[in-house]
Amino acid sequence: EFRRFSLERSKPGKFEEFYGLLQHVHKIPNVDVLVGYTDIHGDLLPINNDDNYHKAVSTANPLLRIFIQRKEDADYSAFGTDTVTRKKNVLSNVLRPDNHRKKPHIVISMPQDFRPVSSIIDVDILPETHRRVRLYKYGTDKPLGFYIRDGSSVRVTPHGLEKVPGIFISRLVPGGLAQSTGLLAVNDEVLEVNGIEVSGKSLDQVTDMMIANSRNLIITVRPANQRNNVVRNSRTSGSSGQSTESSLPSSTPNILGNLLQGEEESDEEDIIIEDSGEPQQIPKAAPASESIESLSQIELLHESTQNGFLPSSEMNLNHSTGSISMEYEVQEPGRKSLEEDGTIITL
Amino acid sequence: MRRFLRPGHDPVRERLKRDLFQFNKTVEHGFPHQPSALGYSPFLRLMAIGTRSGAIKLYGAPGVEFMGLHEENNTVMQIHFIPDQCQLVTLLDDNSLHLWSLKQQGGTSELREEHRFTLKGPPGSPPSATQVTAVLPHSSREVLYLGTESGNIFVVELPSFRVLEDRTITPEAVLQRIPEDNCNRRSCELVEALREHPKNPDQILIGYSRGLIVLWDLQNNKATHHFLGSQQLENLFWQRDGSKFISCHYDGSYSQWPVSSDNRQSEPLENTVPYGPFPCKAISKIYWQTTKNGLPYIIFQGGMPRASYGDRHSISVIHGSQQTAFDFTSRVIDFFIIFSSDPAAEFDDPSALVVLAEEELVVIDLKSAGWPAVHPPYLASLHCSAITCSHHVSNIPLKLWERIISAGSKQNIHYSSMPWPIDGGTNIAPDPPQRDLLLTGHEDGTVRFWDASGVCLHLLYKLSTVRVFLTDADPNDNMNTLGEDEWPPLRKVGTFDPYSDDPRLGIQKIYLCKYSGYLAVAGTAGQVLVMELNDEDAEHVVDHAEADLLQDQEGYRWKGHEKLKTRDGPVQFEAGFQPFVLVQCQPPAVVTSLALHSEWKLVAFGTSHGFGLFDHQQKRLVFVKCTLHPSDQLALEGPLSRVKSLKKSLRQSFRRIRRSRVSSRKRRGGGGNASEVQEANAKFDQDVLQEMELAPVQRKIEARSAEDSFTGFVRTLYFADTFLRDSSRHCPSLWAGTNGGTVYAFCLRVPPAERRMDEPVRAEQAKEIQLMHRAPVVGILVLDGRSTPLPEPLEVAHDLSKSPDMQGSHQLLVVSEEQFKVFTLPKVSSKLKLKLTALEGCRVRKVTVANFGSCKTDDYSENDLAVLTNLGDIQIISLPFLKLQIRYPCIRKEDVSGIASCVFTKYGQGFYLISPSEFERFSLSTKWLVEPRCIVDVPEVTSNNHVHKSGTENAARKS
């Protein structure tokens, strides 16, 4: 059902009033609904308080498209970035029902209210001294904003302590994405980039890898400050324990597969302009019969990693790293599998 | 399940890969970098060159090449062949001696190091006691005489390098028989030269640095003669009959000494300063060659008047009234004379002078009038003007090959017709499978055409684009013209000329169509020349056209160099490739990409501002496209203006550091002692180091954006006949890829042949693809319905390729520095990709389609991508499924110029520069392998020779 009505842009009023207005316009006074709008990036963002309501109105140009969903059957995952690509995945899951993962929606807060810009992932499989951070460049205008340098770190090897070359974060640009997340700091040692170890690679190589992955950068670091590390209450408490154990001894292939898949999900498509028309995203070609073998091969790889291992993630509503552990402790074991894309810091 | 499906685990494919791919560095072409020593064996007719990096290279007949590398990588100081053996000894600057030998194995000869040895003095003796200065391999082949800085001459046995201590010739023993008033202990310091008597192997001539020369009898262990020169000695040379010898000296003089049977001290027969009377530079080596007509050839290095010609690198040849001082383009390392090696011959009869200069090898024919130079079949100085780009064309049709050779032969008339005099060994390599051309573009505006079919990279033809332009140095005013009576009689020889008249002339891109003989050449100042092969000299006007790549963009100011001025009116061109049209890009930025389609008669070119298409049949510009992003100020202002200024400021700051270091040294050097200065320097170094540590190298991590610099820089251009608009009609198209990850596709309408001159060529933009990762596009390729890359223009017309499959759907392959992506056509949808950088951290620098044949079966071959990354690795990636097949480390990643210079051939070989003057050739194919295969046989004369030698020995003993 579509309704069209006007608002005074200079005086939008309070969210509560707006909510009432919506219920009135649609003649659904007693139905609980979720309100969302499409922003300039084409993303579906929620309206549930005064602030994001005002923000939504201010972005109207001049039309503001608002979507209303019944609260009981709302699709939370529709919110946020990568709406288009995620929908596609849903579709592929439907096409292969046996691969479909059930995602029970247990809502503690409203993570969908926010656009993810960074998250800590894979806590259950990483040593406590390491931190795997995912930065979502897409959807923010902020630059990634950090620098790396060569350095050396001390490792325990069979020959005793050895000084080995390493790559370190050397500078965070004020106001950049890296700094605003609070998850990376100067002198953190970079161990992996999108699942690939950096040891033995030169500074330029690591730079190129990071830039090539800049749209969806996953960096595993050994933080210089080890006091804010995640404190794990129990190793097996994770719901992803089923695969955690098998992946612990040499988890690289799984992690790699997982990260590749994750990357695939959020990878932006190239744009084509035909005959000087409008720019469009380049679609994925349906596998032609002659090349089906090679393509299915690739997809198999992704599926098996999807099934084999579910990454966990964490909430980080606060910028201070101290609160991360707090957040973790209140989490229920079952939570981890559902928030695959993790969280969350708003615009 | 997944494991089995993964690429690289298919045993059939693995076996096939072994039959297809194999990595070998096969041969080094060109002139060795920093040569440091020269040797020659008249017996083997092989020449040896040593370098400062410890390499030793042997050359004989064309195709006969050997290479060895000393483990130490030290400078090779001297090379001596063991008489009548396939062995040689090298002396390195760490005072070590190495014995190398040529051994036959599996049908070919190989150069191998057999022994190494360092002379050790008694404990406590100074290092100078054993510092080898002169080496004499004795004709008996059993011993080596080693003259040292201390004046001792050690005798070591071969091949064991055992020191025969009882046979050491000490200064004391030498001085015993010499009157004391003339000599003292110091006269015998430093052995400068050791020469065996040409007729009597029991006598050796010892020359000491201070001028004392002694003839030593090895049988009786005593000095039989001594000669006292007044000047510091440089070198010695025996005349063929052994009755006289020549000494040359530091003051630029040489003396002739008679060796009489009485024991008295001799006076020189003749003492001459050839370029006197003013002070002259040293004569460091001299030859005295006898001839049938009685007039000797006196050939010596150096000796020029110090004040006016002291900077010349000369070798003088005097023969009766003829005298020429060959003036070389770089320092002379060493030289030798090729003369009659038959020991029974009465005269030397020299035939050729072989000179190793620092940058080139020059051979002078001494038999022909005027002493012309001989064109060497190898050791070409690739860097006679710095190489700026290269282009390889495989499988040249015979017709074109012959026409290029004929054009080249007209340029080489001033060379001697003498057959190459260094002709030892036998080349047993099979004839090269095909005719290959390597074209190198140079800084001075020339393009050189090299025969790259076999082991010897040989210059076929040289093309100069300079004639089209007006330059400061007009080629007509010859600066070398010398008057008849000029003294000294200098004559410039050699081709090495690293000084460019005008850097804008530099060649940046070359494209040759081997079927039509059309050649397109583009340069630093935005000039694009289209040429045609003409077998005759011709005078004609070169048509001009301008391509304004900025089009209607306004408010931009080009701060870079101006375009080259062109010559008005008809220009005289020699036979060969003659330009008929010049397209000048505006602004005149360096041309960064070039493509020629000889069938459609179109040439496409790109710079950092955009690209254009030119119809060279109608001589009409078809279209231009500006690729600039409005915010890209850097590209607009000029060639890397800001980058340059940064470089400049860096250089200045370094200079400042150096200057302050020098001045501090001077200041302290005046009063303080040496250790204090050293300390200060050490501290300074430490400070600098610390400073560097404080500010480590950082790399910014930032996603590329459209606003980055040089996004409009056109990296690649490609012509294809494919389905651009719909799947029913294919049409000619032009594709361009930029630094910012954009691909443009233009649909072209080329009129049919019969109306080609009447109707214009039309172009219309059909597609524009923006890669989201925005990495520079380095290659574009269209695959036909069978997933085979489209053939080259005219390839099908010449029956050298199957016509492309136009039934099945075509695919587009876009290679960026970071990813390989396959898209469908005509509707562009992404089909496959391979992310290289995201996984490996390396970037694509060069990419080509190469055809690989199986070494097992003749009928199997496949097309793959040969890729060179910025880490110097070579990867082979399959088509069309983009699977990594194999990876080889090839070039050191620090060797940026080596990586930048790499070219692949169509059949899985490649070349890259290992120094400014040398190409390394490598092969990725099991089937196409060009490498030296040669045999050096010990000539039959050995036994006769030996008999002869022992005969003279007996004779000498009797007397």
Image: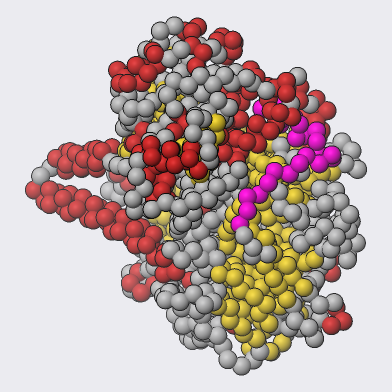
> Relative to residue A65, is residue B693 depicted above or below?
above
Residue B557 locus on image (x, y percent):
41, 75
Residue at x 80%, y 56% (from the top left corner) = B790
Whether B623 is among the magenta residues is: no
Looking at this view, is A237 or B688 the one in front?
A: A237
Judge whether B900 appears above or below B445 on screen. above
Q: Position of residue B565 (x, y in %)?
A: 51, 84
Query: Does B301 sit above or below residue B25?
Result: below
- Quarter the C terminus of chain B occupies: top right
Above or below, A310 relative to A115: above
Q: Nearer the viewer, residue B440 or B156?
A: B440
What percent of the width, then of the height, locates residue B8?
Answer: 73, 28
Q: Residue at x 70, y 83 (%)?
A: B619
Circle count: 0
Q: Position of residue B399 (x, y in %)?
A: 84, 69
Q: Quadrant of residue A152?
A: top left
Residue depicted at x 38% and y 53%: A9
Numbered range of the magenta stretch: A279-302
- Whether residue B638 sits left or right of residue B814 in the image: it is left
Left or right placement of residue B187 versus residue B882 in this view: left
> Is residue A301 a member of the stretch shown in magenta?
yes
Residue at the bottom extreme of this rendering: B569
Quadrant holding the N terminus of chain B: top right
Can the viewer see residue B474? yes
Residue at x 74%, y 70% (from the top left corner)? B748
- Residue B107 in sight: no
Residue B402 lies in quadrant? bottom right
Farthest residue, direction left: B671
Residue B388 is drawn in which quadrant?
bottom right
